[in-house]
Image (cartoon, rainbow, N blue to C red):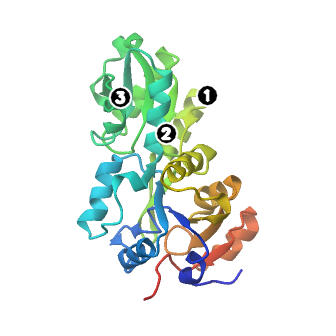
Amino acid sequence: MKIKSFASIATKYEAIFFDAFGVLKDYGGLIPGIDTTLRMLDEAGKEIFILTNDASRSPQALAARYQEQGVTTITPDKIISSGMLAREYIRYKVKSGAVVYLGTANSAHYLEDLGIQCHSIKDIHLDDADQYNALVLLDEEGFDWNHDLSKTINLLRRKNLPVVVANTDRTYPVSRHQLNIAIGGVANMLEDIIGRRFIRFGKPDAQMFLFAYEHLQQRRTITKNKILMVGDTLHTDILGGNKFGLATALVLSGNTLPDHYKFLINSTGIIPDYVCESAVMEQ
């Protein structure tokens, strides 16, 4: 599959769904030139949404990060996060009691917005297990990996709580050649230990794309064949976009390295419509 310029592809579509990490930004900040690209797309009348498995911050906080770096086209209503889907589940399925979460105080915004009691795993007592009606895995930071993960296991042994995973990512890059474990990877470990399956939200599941699609239709009626999903990972961005019926573009600025993309496409059978070096459009 030949590499094409992103500019030659973007002009064919009326709406573009972007993954965040590895597409718009990386461990060093914004990918150079992406601010100009987003401005050009906005001026061309393209609808832009960011679909992210990042549940560590609210859409308002995530958008503020872009605004601080001069990307004024990204506002909170343009961000669709897996945390928003987890929040909707809790809203309709947890009618009473308190919720326990793994994550930072910032990530707890998704639960606090609902007006329910929520407690960090580090602050609870296992003797009070009966008062908790759900456990939500939001972020891989904000708790002690040794003490609090053990406490989580014992909480689930004491009470059969529904467990919601607000980020399906297993890892995330912290440098060009180094990965850290994400909360999706923590969830996999806990599932193996407990012997249960958790409720997961985020790409590649269809809910994420349906949620974004519904938000897009509220702004403007655009058919699926006029939407492009841009991502750096085959198993989340590209697979999810393909399953939802969107055109997909794999960029080589993040998780998928230029030397590996052909092998990964052939070995996984996950085939993007396009491959680009990055999502940057040259002026």
**Residue linked to disc 3:** 114
Q: Residues within 10 Å of mark 1 (few under 14, many from 20)?
A: few
Q: Residues within 10 Å of mark 2 (few under 14, many from 20)?
A: many
Earlier-in-chain disc, 3 versus 1: 3
Any mark on residue 195, and which? 1
Looking at the rendered image, the quarter that the N terminus falls into is: bottom right
Query: Separation of disc 1 and disc 2 at Cα?
Result: 24 Å
Please tell me whether mark 2 sits on a helix, a strand or a loop: helix
Q: Is mark 3 on a helix, strand or loop?
A: loop
Left or right position of 269 against 100: right
Q: Indicate which label's residue lies in the foreground, 3 or 1.
A: 3
Q: Mark 2 points at which residue?
A: 85
- In the rendered structure, the answer to whether residue 104 lies left or right of residue 12 reads left
What amino acid is at disc 1? Gly
- Residues 66 and 117: in front is 66
- At label 2, the amino acid type is Leu
Task: Verify CB contact (< 8 Å) between mark 3 and mark 1.
Answer: no
Residue 167: mark in rendering: none
Counting from the top left corner in percent of width and height, residue 36 is at: 37, 79
- Residue 46, given in percent of the width and then of the height, sits at 49, 69
Decide if residue 239 is on the left or right side of residue 100. Answer: right
Up-down relation of residue 131 to residue 66 (above or below): above
The answer to which quarter of the image holds residue 37 is bottom left
Residue at point 29%, 51% (across, down): 61
| Pair 1/2: label in front | 2
Sequence-wise, which precedes: disc 2 or disc 3? 2
210 or 118, which lies in front?
Answer: 210
* Mark 3 residue type: Leu
